[in-house]
């Protein structure tokens, strides 16, 4: 048996209850990970409220948690990439808030050298999302101008670092002075505090009137019009979240006349083969950047598994810069 955070009812942070449930048994191509840490993602708050169920068939126990790091503890018959004892981090579609978690071997990654095992949990979900959004969805190339909204969020802090390391020029929006300083430290060239400046005007001024080639947006409704108005011709808006709401009027004339692209993305519900391809491309292109220290997991603070409700309240208060870890 193992301890896990199980959702039996949906609602506020008090819906997160710790239970003893059976340890998961790895399938033929799966590894079981003895979890050192998991990490929170914004989607966990929605899942807790019953608004973001795990993909596929209903699990016997609904355990949230989209990523973990730890040590391989058991392997399925056909596993070739890992052995018991290996330190790993993995992208999950659930089950991370627990002492043991399962991952397909091709969705797990060795922890880059120089990164402590427990900090590896701060990497998979946000760095894979940012990597995919910038390059695959956004089609960004070195020299492009990219605007990253919520620049101090988990995904935002990862995106700024990856964009900077790849030779993009980076602007970011944030909601406080503390986050503004953090986004500059991640490598942004221009940071806009949306409480004191309008981002559309600031981006147009920063880009000499051209606009951004790629925008990574998590806000949705409230930002749609201004996003389209500060995209460069042929630019791409990558929609990764809809934190302010998901319906908004759209100026189709602008999309048509300036040949804009709007690309939505959701990682969790993608077919597993696509996630494997993403993980393998990320390993090839990015993992060396962690080993050299060019890119770093950003950790705001850590809570214990018993403090999971407190960790959710902290994320809900929008104070975190980077990731909130759950140490198991
Ligand atoms: N599509 C995917 O596959 C995928 C994968 C991972 C994450 N996501 C999405 O990416 C977003 C970020 O996730 P995360 O875990 O990195 O979040 P996070 O660390 O909790 O950061 C979210 C930040 O967004 C800002 N924010 C929240 N509500 C806002 C609003 N209404 N208007 C403007 N800013 C707002 C706040 O920062 P300020 O103080 O700066 O306003 C907040 O701290 C979420 O929408 C999440 O669902 C999507």
Image (cartoon, helix red, strand yellow):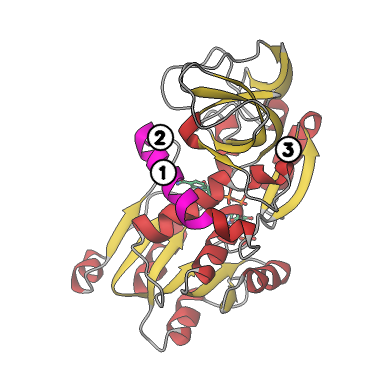
Q: 10 Å neighbourhood of mark 2: few (<14), some, or many (≥20)?
A: few
Residue topped by disc 1: 266
Give residue 131's position: percent from left, percent from top: 46, 55
Give the quarter of the figure containing the C terminus.
Answer: top right
Q: Nearer the viewer, residue 43 or 22?
A: 22
The residue lying toward the viewer, choosing from 188 and 241, is 188
Is 320 placed above or below 270 here? below
Query: Distance from label 3 to label 1 (Cα)?
Result: 23 Å
Residue at the extreme bottom: 208
What residue lies at 35% left-to-right and 55% top-to-bottom?
136
Q: Which residue is mark 3?
A: 326
* Residue, disc 2: 269
Residue 84 image point, x, y percent: 64, 25
Helix, strand or loop under label 2:
loop
Q: Earlier in the sequence, mark 3 or mark 1?
A: 1
| Picture residue at 58% right of the left edge, 71% below the top | 194
Quadrant assignment for the N terminus: top right
Name the chief secondary structure element in magenta: helix
Whether disc 2's CB lies below 8 Å from ligand 1 is answered no
Region rendered in magenta? 270-286
Asked if disc 1 is less than 8 Å from ligand 1, the answer is yes
Q: Secondary structure at mark 3?
A: strand
């Amino acid at each position: 048996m193992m301890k896990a955070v199980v959702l039996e009812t949906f609602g506020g942070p008090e819906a997160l209850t710790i239970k003893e449930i059976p340890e998961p048994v790895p399938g033929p191509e799966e590894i079981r990970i003895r979890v050192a840490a998991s990490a929170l993602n914004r989607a966990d708050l929605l899942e807790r409220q019953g608004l973001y169920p795990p993909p596929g068939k209903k699990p016997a126990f609904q355990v949230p948690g989209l990523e973990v790091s730890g040590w391989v503890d058991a392997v399925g018959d056909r596993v070739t990439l890992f052995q018991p004892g290996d330190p790993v981090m993995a992208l999950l579609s659930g089950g991370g808030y627990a002492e043991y978690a399962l991952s397909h071997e091709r969705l797990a990654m060795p922890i880059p050298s120089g990164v402590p095992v427990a900090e590896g949990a701060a990497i998979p979900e946000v760095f894979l999302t940012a990597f995919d959004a910038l390059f695959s969805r956004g089609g960004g190339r070195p020299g492009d101008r990219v605007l990253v909204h919520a620049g101090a969020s988990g995904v935002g802090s990862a995106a700024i670092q990856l964009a900077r390391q790849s030779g993009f020029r980076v602007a970011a929006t944030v909601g406080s002075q503390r986050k503004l300083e953090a986004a500059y430290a991640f490598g942004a060239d221009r940071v806009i505090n949306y409480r004191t400046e309008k981002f559309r005007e600031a981006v147009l001024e920063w880009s000499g009137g051209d606009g951004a080639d790629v925008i990574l947006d998590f806000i949705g409704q409230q930002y749609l019009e201004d996003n389209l108005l500060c995209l460069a011709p042929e630019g791409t808006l990558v929609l990764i979240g809809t934190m302010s709401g998901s319906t908004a009027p759209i100026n189709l004339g602008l999309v048509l006349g300036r040949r804009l692209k709007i690309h939505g993305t959701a990682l969790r519900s993608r077919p597993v083969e696509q996630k494997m391809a993403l993980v393998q491309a990320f390993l090839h292109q990015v993992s060396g950047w962690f080993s050299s220290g060019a890119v770093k997991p950003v950790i705001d603070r850590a809570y214990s598994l018993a403090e999971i409700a407190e960790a959710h309240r902290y994320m809900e208060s929008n104070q975190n810069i980077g990731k909130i870890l759950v140490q198991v």
